[in-house]
Amino acid sequence: MNDISQGAMTETQCVVRWLAAFEAALTAGDAEALRRILGAQVHWRDLMALTWTITPHDDVDSAVAGLLAAQAKMQAHSFRLAETRTAPRRVTRHGTASIEAFFSFETTFARCSGTLRLLADAPDRAWVLATSLDELKGHEEPINMRRPAGSAYSRNFGGDNWTDIRAKKAAFTDRDPAVLIIGAGQAGLAIAARLGLLGVDTLIVDKTPRVGDVWRNRYHSLALHNQVKLNHMPYLPWPPNWPKYLPKDMIAGWLETYAWAMECNVWTSTEFLGATYDEGRWTVTLRREDGTTRVMKPRHLVMANGIAGKPLKARLPGLDSFKGTVLHTNDYGEGAKWRGRNVIVVGAGTSGHDVAQDLHGHGAKVTMIQRGATTVASIKAAGLVHSVYYEEDIPLEDCDGIAIASSYPLLVKGYQSAVVKMKEIDRDLLDGLTKAGFKLDFGADETGHQMKFRRRHGGYYLDCGCSELIAKGEIAVVQAEDTDHYTADGLRMKDGSTLQADLVVTATGYQSQETVVREMLGDAIADRVGQIWGIAPNGEIANMFVATPQPGLWFSGGGFAHCRIYSHYIAMGIKLREMGLI
C-alpha cells in the first residue's frame, strides 16, 4: 500500500498529486493512466467545460473515452486547487467517505472549475468528477474589479443619463433582440441578467402587469418550503435580514427590484402569441398592452414560463352540475370569505395542502380529496436531501459546486439513503397521517420527494402544518375511489351519503410544457423537441438548460436553485452560438 492510502499525506497533498496525475494522463492521451486514477464506478459530469453541453458519464469506460475525445479539441491544462474556494476536506457523500475538493483549470477557450471527490481509503482514485465552464476568454463578465466606469451616462451634461439610455434600450424601437425570453419569473430574469453581462441583447416578455406578479398573484399564504440560502438569485442574494422561509410578496418585490438593478429589458402586459422558425431565426408575434402587435426575429427563444402551462380544468363527474363556486388553486386568493362554510379541496400535493390549511385557518370546514398516494416530509427531514450542504458553513459557490457534481445514479443513491433517515425523523408524523386515512408513498424506488420533483414535478408535500391538522382530524381526508359524483350541493359518496360543499378548489395541476410548445410553436417543433422535464435517457432533466433538438429553442424552470445554477449554462450556450463556436 502506498503512502497516500496509508494516510501519510494531507487532504490537500492528495488532491494536488491527483490533479497532476490527471493532467499528465489527459495531456498524453493515456487511457490506461486515466483508468488507474479513476475509480471503477467513477461518475464524471461535464457542464459545458469540455463538451459544450451537460454530459454525464457513469462508468469508467465512458468517462475515459469522453475525456480523451474532449481533450483533442479543448486542450485542458493548468489543473490546480482553486485558491479562493473551500480547502480539501473529508466528507461523506452518498454514503461514501471521500476527500472533497474544488479545483480550477483552463481550456483553449475558457476558464473552468470543478468538484473532485477522491475515495478516502484510496485517495489516488477519484469516484466523482465534475467540470464546469466558468467564463469564456475575452468575454469575461464586467463585474467586481472589471465593473464599467459608467462614462456613457455619468455626468453627461446636456445628454442622456442612465435612465434615458435604459428606456431607449428597453424599447427596441430600432432593432430586434438576439434572445427573446418568455416569462419574467426567477428563471427568465436570471438568464437575462447573465446574458446582459455577456453582451447578448435580450428582451423578456411577460403577460402580467408587473415583474413579480407570477408570485404576487398567487394565494395569500404562500411561502417557500425550503430555506433562503438555497434560493438566492445570481449576483444579488436575498437581503441578510430576510426570513429563512420567504413569503411570496417579498419574493415578488425582490424580483421587480432585481430586474431594475440588473438592467433586464422587460416588456410587461405583453402576450406571446406564437412563433415559427426558419433559416436561423424565429418569427415571433407579440401583443402589447394597447392591443397592437409586434413581430420580432430573434435568433434564440427561451421558454422560461415555468414547467407547466395553463391550469388544467378538472374533469370530475358531475362537477358541471355543482351550484357552488369552483376554483383552481391558480385562481385561489385567500379564505376569509369562506369562514364557517364547507369546502372540498381536490388534490393532495403542495398547493392542495397549502390551500386547505389557509381555508382551515380562516374557519372553513375543509375536506381534502386524495386522488393518489402522496410523499410527505417535514421541513426538518427534507433538509437532509435538498439543502444539507447549503447549511454547511461554506460559500454559496461551493454549495452549488457540490450540487452539480451528482449525476442521476448518485442522486438516486443519495435520495434513497436520505429517505430512510427521513422516515425515522418523521415517524410520528407519518403514523398520524396513516391513521387519518391519508395514503403515503416515497416513490417507486424509495427516492422520495426530490426525485418526484425531477420526474413529474409534483406528488409531494413538505409539511408546513397541514399534516398535523389532518392527523388531528381538523382537515378531513377522503379517498377519490370512495367518491361517486358531484351534485348541485356537494359530492355524492359511493355509500350514498353526500359531502356538502359551498366551494370546490381543484388542485389538479397544469398543462405540460409539451402541450404549451405544441400550441405556441406547432406540431413539427413539438415532435422534434419531445419530452420536456422528467428524466431523459442520460439521467438529466429532459431538454432543460441545454440546447434542444430544435435549434434556437431553450427551456428553463424549476426552483430558485435550478434557476440560479443553470441560467449560467443556458447563457453560456447562447453566447457560444453567438460567437460562432458552436
Image (cartoon, rainbow, N blue to C red):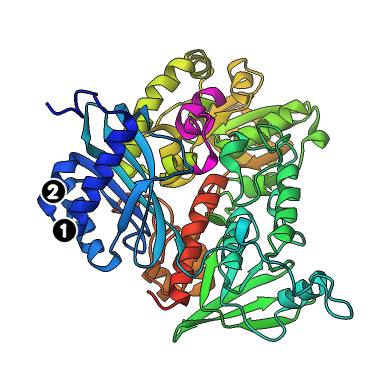
Q: Quadrant of residue 490?
A: top right
The residue nearer to you, when weighing 74 against 540, is 74
Whether residue 541 is visible here, answered yes or no, is no
- Asked whether residue 497 is in view, the answer is yes
Residue drawn at the location 69% of the way across and 68% of the way down? 265
The mark found on residue 33 in the picture is 2
Q: Amino acid at mark 1?
A: Ala
Magenta span contains residue 20: no
Residue 438 in the image: state x and y as whole percent.
51, 24
Question: In this picture, is 343 found above or below 22?
Answer: above
Residue 253 placed where, x, y %? 76, 49
Q: Which mark is residue 208?
A: none
Q: Is residue 536 left or right of residue 477?
A: left
Say which element carries label 1. Answer: helix
Callouts 2 and 1 close, C-beta under 8 Å: yes
Looking at the image, residue 287 sits to the left or right of residue 134; the answer is: right
* Separation of residues labelled 2 and 1 (CA atoms): 9 Å
User: Few, some or many C-alpha atoms within 10 Å of disc 1 (few <14, some 14-19, many ≥20)?
Assistant: few
**Span colored in magenta:** 379-397
Residue nearest the viewer, comparing 205 with 4: 4
Instruction: Give the side of residue 407 with respect to residue 569, left or right.
Output: left
